[in-house]
Amino acid sequence: MDRLLNVVMLLSAGLIVLVLASLRRAHIRVEYSVSWLAAGLGLLVLSRAEGTLIWLARVLGVEEPPLALLFVSFSVFLLVFYRFSIIISELKDANIALAQRLAILQYEIESLHEKAKAGQAG
């Protein structure tokens, strides 16, 4: 179990470092990095709190604490992915609305140009 906890600790610390480096280089926005930082920090704490992990395994009805850790890890990342699916859906809807507004503005500009040409010709 110690080996698994050490691997999870290293992976979660690596995730935190990766997210912070991406923030520094402006590859990821702050509001999106919070979920990843919280997930990494939560897994880091859980990998170091063996008593909490044993308690969590009992609560979940699992005999082995590593299984509880894997379940929690899967659940945390599933929640993060769900959150980002919602964000992507909102961005797609906003993008569609923006494209529609642009098309309307383009139509109005073309109409004004045609009216101006007709006014000059007449």
Image (cartoon, rainbow, N blue to C red):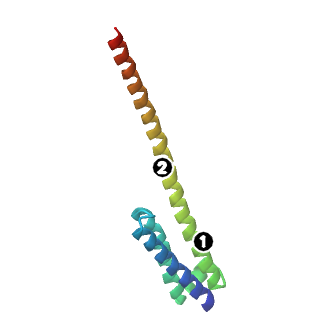
- Residue 70 placement (x, y as % from top left): 62, 77
Quadrant of residue 120 within the rendered picture: top left
Give the residue at x 60% y 91%.
2
**Foreground mark, 2 or 1?**
2
Which residue is outermost to the top? Answer: 122
Q: Is residue 33 above or below residue 90?
A: below
Instruction: Tell me the residue at 53%/89% (across/down).
Output: 51
Q: Residue at x 57, y 88 (%)?
A: 6
Residue 1 place in picture, x, y as percent: 63, 90
**Mark 1 packing: few (<14 Cα in 10 Å), some, or many (20+)?**
few
Type of the residue with mark 1: Phe
Q: Position of residue 85 (x, y in %)?
A: 54, 56
Q: Earlier in the sequence, mark 2 or mark 1?
A: 1
**Type of amino acid at the residue the image marks with label 2:** Glu
Residue 92 lies left or right of residue 69; in this view the side is: left
The number of numbered badges drawn on the structure is 2
Label for residue 90?
A: 2
Query: Which quadrant of the structure image shows residue 106?
Result: top left
Which residue is depicted at the point 54% across and 89% down?
Answer: 50
Q: Are marks 2 and 1 in contact (CB under 8 Å)?
A: no
Q: Is residue 72 above or below residue 51?
A: above
Secondary-structure class at tag 2 = helix
Q: Is residue 52 visible?
A: no
The circle drawn on residue 74 is 1
Q: Quadrant of residue 37?
A: bottom left
